[in-house]
Image (cartoon, grey):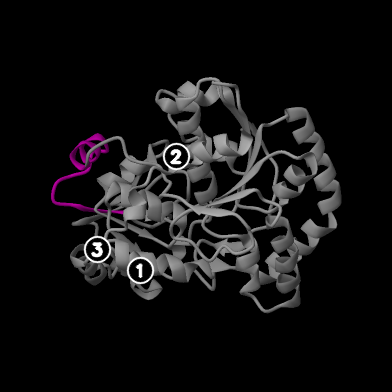
């Protein structure tokens, strides 16, 4: 098979974009020993610092280069549960001011890199480059930023949304993941399967590996790259005799006067930690929903601010997941029992699309675009 080089621009908005795109690229390179990739992202090396080089990551690592660059603004977060729209507006204006010089410098980088395809998860900016250089392009994601920004009424958001819509229209093919918002700005789209990292261990193996005790419930706190302020918790209500809080180690740290019952496990294969846990406490995001599905772990989810993706994720949670809503008041007061019972007993309607092989669909799309 011919050598193919992928140039992937990956959003730094949280960990979900880098998690799924890197998973797809790793698996595709594993199947195609002649293929290589460059990942342009603010999150690349930060995220991979937790990956195990002894596994498949180590096999493909020499064929993946990382470059730290930012191709979208995203939404500025106060923390995982709250957004800062005023700061987002300021960053949009700053990004636009520097956009022409950024476009020139990034175009020169791509000219030297000479990729066979440009992949974006999920900004529109790379399509300006791919269109100008006549390089095939694909979008991967469950929302476009023009749709997200169109939700907010300020003139800055509305105008920027219209600008991004024109950029997305330059994309050759949009690969739309499940759990998606409407994707209307990309002319040619294809719905693909659920993409996310999967556990390597069974439930029993994972609990044994992490030293989880029998008769204890383990709640994985998964609040992404931004975390939440642990001082909001009412630690007087925390009883660790039957429950443990689990933290993956790369996200955030809890500071409590009595940290008994708080387990931090850094540098782990996160899907295995998900599988070992009885529940995951989170705000809805594509990354944690996809990985929880593959790990078969019930989800307790709370509000995440006025973000338009939330509605579509909750619809999926209520239909296709063992899940339950938990208010932030109950979350911070450790009143988790009722939500846990609801999650375990909830009826689940299987989504056949979740079973599709997203990795193969992406690879087939690449080959179709570059033939």
Q: Position of residue 70 (x, y in %)?
A: 69, 47
**Res 349 → quadrant:** bottom left
Q: In this figure, which residue is indicated by the disc labeled 1?
A: 331
Q: Gap between marks 1 and 2, in whole Å? A: 36 Å
Q: Position of residue 252 (x, y in %)?
A: 47, 51
Asked if residue 263 is positioned above or below residue 366 in the image, the reply reads below
Q: Secondary structure at mark 3?
A: loop
> What residue is drawn where x is 61% and y is 33%?
371
Mark nearest the camera among 3 and 1 is: 3
253 vs 93, left or right, is: left
Q: Position of residue 284 (x, y in %)?
A: 43, 62
Please report whichever mark, 1 or 2, sits nearer to the chain's N-terminal start: 1
Q: Is residue 214 magenta?
A: yes
Q: Position of residue 112 (x, y in %)?
A: 78, 28
Q: Earlier in the sequence, mark 3 or mark 2?
A: 3
Q: Which residues are magenta?
A: 203-219
How many marks the image carries: the answer is: 3
Q: At 56% across and 54% down in the image, what residue appears? A: 189
Location of residue 199 with respect to 128 vertically, above or below: above
Q: Secondary structure at mark 1?
A: helix
Quadrant for residue 136, please give it: top right
Give the label on residue 359, or none. Answer: 2
Q: Nearer the viewer, residue 351 or 327?
A: 351
Residue under numbered circle 3 = 348
Q: CA distance from mark 3 to mark 1?
A: 24 Å
> For the residues marked 3 and 2, what is the alpha-carbon distance in whole angstroms?
25 Å
Mark 1 crowdedness (10 Å alpha carbons): few <14, some 14-19, many ≥20: some
């Amino acid at each position: 098979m011919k050598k193919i080089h992928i140039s992937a621009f990956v959003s730094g908005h949280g960990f979900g974009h880098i998690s799924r795109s890197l998973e797809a690229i790793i698996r595709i390179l594993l199947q195609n020993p002649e293929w290589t990739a460059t990942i342009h992202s603010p999150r690349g090396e930060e995220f991979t610092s937790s990956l195990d080089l002894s596994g498949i990551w180590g096999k493909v690592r020499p064929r993946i280069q990382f470059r730290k660059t930012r191709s979208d603004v995203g939404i500025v977060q106060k923390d995982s549960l709250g957004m800062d729209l005023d700061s987002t507006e300021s960053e949009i204006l700053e990004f636009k001011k520097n956009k022409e010089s950024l476009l020139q410098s990034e175009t020169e980088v791509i000219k030297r890199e000479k990729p066979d395809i440009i992949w974006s998860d999920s900004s529109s900016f790379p399509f300006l480059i791919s269109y100008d250089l006549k390089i095939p392009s694909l979008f991967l994601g469950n929302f476009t930023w023009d749709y997200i920004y169109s939700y907010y009424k300020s003139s800055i958001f509305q105008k920027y949304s219209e600008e991004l819509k024109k950029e997305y229209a330059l994309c050759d093919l949009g690969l739309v993941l499940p759990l998606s918002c409407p994707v209307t700005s990309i002319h040619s789209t294809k719905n693909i399967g659920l993409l996310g990292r999967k556990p390597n261990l069974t439930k029993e193996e994972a609990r044994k590996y992490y030293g989880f005790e029998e008769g204890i419930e383990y709640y994985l706190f998964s609040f992404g790259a931004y975390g939440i302020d642990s001082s909001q918790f009412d630690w007087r209500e925390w009883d660790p005799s039957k429950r443990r809080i689990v933290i993956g180690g790369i996200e955030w740290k809890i500071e409590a006067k009595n940290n008994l019952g708080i387990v931090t496990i850094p540098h782990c294969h996160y899907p295995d930690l998900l599988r070992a846990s009885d529940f995951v406490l989170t705000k809805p995001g594509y990354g944690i929903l996809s990985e929880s599905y593959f790990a078969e772990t019930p989800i307790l989810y709370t509000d995440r601010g006025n973000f338009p993706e939330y509605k579509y994720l909750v619809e999926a949670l209520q239909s296709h997941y063992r899940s339950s809503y938990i208010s932030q008041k109950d979350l911070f007061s450790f009143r988790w029992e009722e939500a846990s019972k609801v999650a375990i007993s909830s009826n689940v309607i299987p989504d056949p699309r979740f079973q599709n092989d997203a990795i193969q669909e992406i690879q087939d799309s690449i080959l179709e675009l570059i033939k």
